[in-house]
Image (cartoon, rainbow, N blue to C red):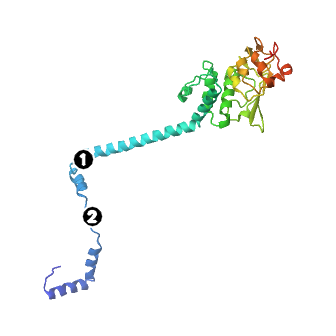
């Protein structure tokens, strides 16, 4: 279509478009509706056309992107490792530090120097769980893995588990609930009072106990009754250990292979003195203090 500046010619052009059934204003409207073509960032246009981004070559760009990605992955991995390590320590060994500190504190308070207990928690991780390791180290290793222990039971569970290892607990006739998450008062032979919450006695008569009576038995300071008859215990009664059991009233150790004489320390136990004739079964008499 030829246009001119002459009004008559312009009118003829309009008439020609109108006769053809076209609206001359539609062309202007369509042009107005067309969105403006976006202009590319010169840097990206350079990358697309020349392989450069400013002063950077395409390979340099890829290198920067790869290094940045690796850096982000490294930072995320470090963060995850730190979070996992903290969570792992708190979840695998709940209150482990509190357990160890509680035991060490009570041992120091009672001046029980015969037990050497390192304060480094990692030491117990490496304790060999057999007779080559001291029973109290094995007991602490178990306690640190005991996820259900209550704070008030930390020390009692440590002492009882140490006796378990010292007296051949793996071969006992009955060791129900020992070294499990069950409450201490639910362990076979453990006797409690006051609503089944306060330890007061240990009854392991005729239960295949073996070995010598360890000094750790003196850590049961609240015990009032001990029944260990009809087992395979041997050696002397540790007088220094029993001397610490001020509440001890009943002690049955007959029908074992114990040797020596009755230790003089038993004569200083005033509560046991009330029962010395009827409740002590031993080859000898309790010496008077």
Of residues 273 and 177, which is closer to you in this image? Answer: 273
**Circle 2 Cα neighbour tier, 10 Å, few/some/many (<14 / 14–19 / ≥20):** few
Instruction: Say which mark, if any, is on residue 38.
Output: 2
Report the side of 254 relative to 16 (left or right): right
**Circle 1 Cα neighbour tier, 10 Å, few/some/many (<14 / 14–19 / ≥20):** some
Residue 16 shows up from this direction: yes
Label total for image: 2
Q: What residue is shown at x 51% (from left), y 39% (from top)?
A: 86
Image coords of residue 126 (percent x, y): 55, 25
- Toward the front, the furthest residue is 289
Image coords of residue 147 (percent x, y): 62, 36
Q: Looking at the figure, which quarter contains the C terminus?
A: top right
Q: Earlier in the sequence, mark 2 or mark 1?
A: 2
- Toward the bottom, the furthest residue is 8
- Toward the right, the furthest residue is 278
Q: What residue is shown at x 64% (from left), y 29% (from top)?
A: 106
Q: What residue is shown at x 66% (from left), y 25% (from top)?
A: 162
Q: Quadrant of residue 188?
A: top right
Up-down relation of residue 267 to residue 41 (above or below)? above
Disc 2 is placed on an element classified as loop
Report the side of 74 relative to 91 (left or right): left
Q: Quadrant of residue 226?
A: top right
Instruction: Say which mark, if any, is on residue 241.
Output: none
Q: Quadrant of residue 72?
A: top left
Image coords of residue 180 (percent x, y): 67, 32
Of residues 44 and 118, which is closer to you in this image? Answer: 118
Residue 190 shows up from this direction: no
Tags 2 and 1 in contact by the CB under 8 Å rule?
A: no
Report the side of 25 relative to 127 (left or right): left
Of residues 185 and 237, which is closer to you in this image? Answer: 237
- What residue is pinned by disc 1? 58
């Amino acid at each position: 279509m030829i246009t001119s500046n002459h009004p008559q010619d312009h009118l003829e052009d309009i008439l020609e478009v109108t006769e053809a059934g076209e609206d001359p204003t539609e062309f202007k409207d369509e042009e107005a509706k067309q969105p403006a073509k976006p202009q590319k960032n010169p840097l990206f246009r350079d990358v697309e056309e020349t392989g450069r981004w400013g002063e950077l070559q395409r390979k340099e760009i890829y290198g920067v992107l790869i290094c940045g990605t690796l850096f982000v992955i490294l930072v995320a991995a470090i963060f995850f490792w730190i979070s996992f390590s903290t969570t792992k320590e708190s979840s695998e060994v709940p209150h482990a530090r509190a357990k160890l500190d509680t035991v060490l504190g009570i041992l120091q308070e009672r001046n029980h120097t015969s037990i050497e207990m390192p304060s480094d928690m990692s030491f117990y991780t490496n304790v060999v769980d057999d007779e080559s390791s001291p029973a109290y180290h094995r007991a602490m290793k178990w306690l640190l893995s005991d996820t259900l222990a209550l704070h008030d039971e930390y020390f009692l569970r440590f002492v009882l588990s140490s006796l378990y290892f010292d007296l051949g607990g793996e071969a006992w006739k009955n060791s129900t609930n020992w070294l499990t998450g069950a409450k201490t008062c639910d362990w076979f032979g453990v006797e409690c009072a006051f609503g089944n919450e306060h330890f007061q006695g240990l009854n392991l008569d005729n239960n295949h106990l073996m070995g010598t009576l360890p000094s750790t038995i003196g850590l049961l300071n609240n015990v009032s009754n001990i029944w260990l008859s009809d087992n395979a215990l041997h050696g002397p009664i540790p007088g220094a250990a029993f001397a610490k059991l001020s509440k001890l009233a009943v002690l049955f150790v007959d029908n074992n292979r114990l040797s020596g004489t009755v230790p003089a320390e038993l004569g200083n136990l005033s509560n046991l003195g009330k029962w010395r004739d009827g409740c002590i079964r031993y080859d000898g008499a309790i010496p008077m203090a």
